[in-house]
Amino acid sequence: MLILAVLGVGVLQYPSAVSWFTAHVQASQVTGYSEEVDRLPLAVREAELSDAVEYNSHLPGSPLGDPYNPGPEANPSVEGVAQYFDTLASTSAMARLRIPTIGVDLPIYHGTGDEALSHGVGHMFGSSLPVGGAGTHAVLAAHSGLVNAKMFDDLHKLQTGDRFTVIVLGEILTYEVDQILVVTPNDTEALRAEAERDYITLVTCTPIGVNSHRVLVRGERIATNAAASGSLAVPEAGQRPGFPWWAVIIVGVPSAFALALRPRRSSRPPRQPAPHRVAQHTPAPPAPTQPPLAQPAPPQPAPMQTPPPRRPFGRHLPEQPAPAPLPAQPCGRHCATTEERRPQPRPARRAARVPLWRRVLRALRVGRRQCRHGASRQPPETLSSASRSLASHAASSSRESSHP
């Protein structure tokens, strides 16, 4: 039962646990990006930003496709792909995206392939690089509804007027949401750049699990100096995940089951022994200090006289000795000895008296049989005393009958 409880809680808390670890890894990546930027010389950072601005100025402005379909960046032989990946490549990530309203703090990588989208936010190839400037429109895409990570799951909760920031090589760019659209994957007209406008559009799939449409949250750049205070202040370290309550549930629920299934001690009083057992084990009370008053002793019945046992077959049979009584031994129970528990033997039954004529007839038959067949086959010393007495009685009877 306890094993089933642990397995059930583990399955239910698996998404929360994996999301927590993924958020921890992403926060480490953001912190590492900030440390890499701090280690870069100022001249290198300025050169990287200049190259990104020049790259944006040479974009053809052709219509864009669905960010989640394989684009030209998957083919290195396409013109401009190599230059795209070489721009803003001095650090492990291209930039950093923070949306305080929904608690998003993720790194931005080149392209929208599976490798980039599995670690954070991807920049769509063909759109402007997120370095700002008039006539630019950067497109940033991320997944929603993943089991192992929480990225743009709450993007649909943003409202007009909310703000987000993009940090690229130490530069903080602030944008304010001015448009939210839900379109089909092929409807990309809202992703075109507009003259004298500085836009960034955040894209994700909707509804979660169906992914039949796209959510487009567009933000227009505002002055950073006025918005840098308060919740938009950018910390150096990444946003660490909160306390892992899933661990408390995983440990607490099985522990509660174990305590509930533990055998409880009975609150009932101990069982009292039976009265007869108490009487057997209870020692005799001590003798009273003062003798009780003398009382007349009750008359004792006369002992019953047991008649002596009779001989079973007459006077010629020897008396059988009575069996010796067994020695009295304790039986190991509550009685004192075995002799007290053994039933007393009944008095011997009186042997039936055989008439004289029957005894004489029996003796004559024995004598005739011996005269007819001769002496007995058994040696004389093996004959019993009863046989010898019967034989002598038969012989004397035959002699008496032969004389008149």
Image: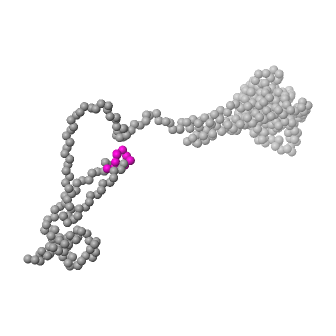
Query: What residue sits 15% from the left and 68% below the top?
Result: 358
Q: Residue 317's x, y, as percent?
A: 21, 65
Res 189 visible: no
What main secondary structure does the magenta stretch of the protein show? Answer: loop
Q: In which quadrant will I find the N terminus?
A: top right
Residue lying at 19% horizontally and 40% vertically, measured from the top left: 299
**Is-magenta flag for residue 48?**
no
Asked whether 338 falls inside the magenta stretch, the response is yes
* Residue span colored magenta: 331-339
Residue at position x 18%, y 64% in the image:
315
121 and 205: which one is in front?
121
Q: Residue furthest top?
A: 226
Residue 258 placement (x, y as % from top left): 56, 38
Q: Quadrant of residue 145?
A: top right
In the rendered image, the residue lying farthest to the front is 290
Residue 310 in the image: x percent, y percent? 20, 59
Above or below, 315 against 334 in this view is: below
Image quadrant assignment for residue 229: top right
Question: In this rendering, does residue 268 appear at all?
Answer: yes
Left or right of residue 21: residue 350 = left
